[in-house]
Amino acid sequence: MSDYPAHIEIIPQVHLIRGENNARFPEANTLLIDDEILTLVDAGSSMKNIESTLKDLGHSMPDLDRIVLTHFHIDHKGHASEIQKIADCEIICHELAETGVKTFQGMVDFYGIGGHKYYDDWRALLDLRFGHVMSEYTVTSTFSDGVTIDCGHTELIPIHLPGHTIDHTCFGINGLETIFLVDIDLTRFGPWYGNKVSDIEEFKKSVDRVIEMNPSVGISSHLINPVTDGLDERLHAFRAIFDEREQRILDSISKGIDTIEKLSKAPTIYPRIPMDVYYAFEMFMLEKHIELLKRDGLLREENKCFVLER
């Protein structure tokens, strides 16, 4: 039982359905737009919290008209397929998300984990906690960057901000003063780009774009309250983590921690690894940093080890 209410109203007709466990992975927040077209944005909160929120607002699951998915990740597409079977509702996503949303194999390909030595650990995690994402999802249509999604009195503005994933999309709510930041999540966990379809440089540009938009309210998928005070500072601090990680990699290599395996076991990106599957994502992120550091002439590879350029 969470020690906070399952949902709060952010602005009229827009409710944040909070994830369990303080919305930490494997949970994520969901938005409910209680409007003429009853709309969920993502479906990663527990079914219990989604159902109780609908009930509190005078609805039930079959009343839902539409689910809008921000990207293909398991804690975001979440229960969408289950809900669609109950409500016979639409599921819409960015056109770049379809492969990762529709089928399990497509999701595996987007994660890039097929054949990886930690694949069995990843699959075991899914079997334990995410059985609901193993089925196929029926995507009924796609949305486009900047083309408003009309819910009645409420308008959702898709803002394609890749890097976290190729399809990662945030949403302005009735303009750009209030933005659902999704996995530009402002948590201490920091930016996450541990998939085949993730890109560090694109992620940096995406955070920079949000900073330029200068929103007043930022809604994270993994914080139980919207961020208002100090939002600009939080965004800049989140952006700085990329460079902090890069410097940590260089420092580690200077100390002889000079292979991906050694760097992952230090660990380097995250201070601790809670389960073995996280080593896969640590490795993916390290590999992306290493390629950029090689490109920029800061290190080279000799005899399968990394060496700093002097």
Image (cartoon, rainbow, N blue to C red):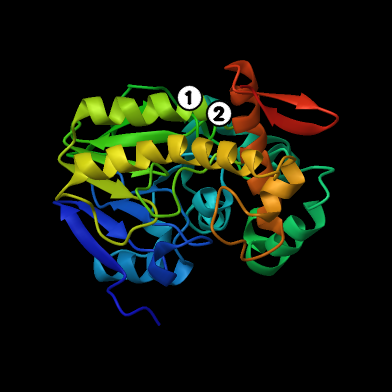
Task: Name the element at disc 1.
Answer: helix
Q: Residue at x 25, y 59 (%)?
A: 225
**Nearest the camera: 264 or 65?**
264
Q: Quadrant of residue 215?
A: top left
Mark 1 packing: few (<14 Cα in 10 Å), some, or many (20+)? some
Image quadrant where one finds the C terminus: top right
Q: Residue at x 83, y 50 (%)?
A: 117
**Nearest the camera: 181 or 17?**
181
| Residue with the mark numbered 2 | 199
Q: Quadrant of residue 68?
A: top left
Q: Quadrant of residue 298?
A: top right
Q: Is residue 146 above or below residue 180?
A: above
Q: Residue at x 76, y 26 (%)?
A: 301
Q: Is residue 186 above or below residue 98?
A: below
Is residue 137 among what the camera can see?
yes
Q: Position of residue 11 (x, y in %)?
A: 15, 50
Task: Name the element at disc 2.
Answer: loop
| Residue with the mark numbered 1 | 202
Q: Is residue 158 above or below residue 278?
A: above
Mark 2 packing: few (<14 Cα in 10 Å), some, or many (20+)? many
Q: Are marks 1 and 2 in contact (CB under 8 Å)?
A: yes
Mark pair 1, 2: CA separation: 5 Å
**Nearest the camera: 292 or 280?**
292
